[in-house]
Image (tube, rainbow, N blue to C red):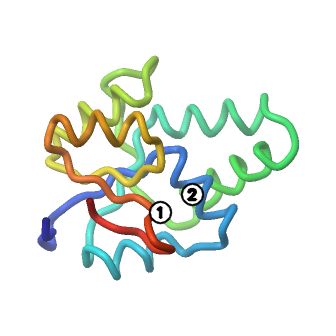
Amino acid sequence: MELSRNRKVILDTSILIFVFERGIDIDDEILREVGKVEILIPRSVINELERLSSSSKGSRRILAKAARELVRNRGYQIIESKDEKDVDRDIMILAKDLNAVVATLDKKLIEELKKTSIGVLTWKNKRLRLI
């Protein structure tokens, strides 16, 4: 699947936290794999990061805070959610509505996205890949 210039990529919580665990520049990885795209973050993902940064302990808490800062510093577009209670469902609805690809490491979400023919970017063989 090749993306055109007007395509969108939705980042989920797992990929945002992962980039800090591994020291990866997500923008560079996306650019290398699919080209220039608009990066979107659902409000439900922001809320989940806020929950994790206040209720988690240790490194998980630090990573969630860092991910929130990344979203703020990079100026990613935050989009309103369709389902605030179920983040995965929200991402699926938004991806379908916006014809977007989803960047995630969540195996369950990946399977659901594939079933509905939504493009997936995930970490595979030491780089971000479109599957």
Count of marks overlaid on the render: 2
**Residue 121 location (% of width, % of height):** 34, 59
**Residue 92 location (% of width, % of height):** 27, 34
Looking at the image, which residue is at 60% across and 57% down?
Answer: 18
Question: Where residue 120 is drawn, which disc sits there?
Answer: none
Query: Mark 1 belongs to which amino acid?
Result: Gly
114 with respect to 79 (left or right): left
**Residue 117 location (% of width, % of height):** 14, 43
Q: Classify the position of the N terminus by image quarter.
A: bottom left
Q: Which residue is mark 2?
A: 72
Q: Which residue is mark 1?
A: 75
CA separation, marks 1 and 2?
5 Å
26 with respect to 48 (left or right): left
- Mark 1: secondary structure: loop
Q: Is residue 80 above or below residue 65?
A: above
30 and 71: which is toward the camera = 30
Disc 1 crowd, CA 10 A, few/some/many (<14, 14-19, 20+): few
Q: Is residue 102 above or below residue 115?
A: below
- Mark 2: secondary structure: helix
17 and 65: which is toward the camera = 17
Q: Quadrant of residue 53?
A: top right
**Residue 41 location (% of width, % of height):** 42, 48
| Residue with the most extreme front position | 125
Looking at the image, which residue is at 47% across and 42% down?
Answer: 106
Disc 2 crowd, CA 10 A, few/some/many (<14, 14-19, 20+): few
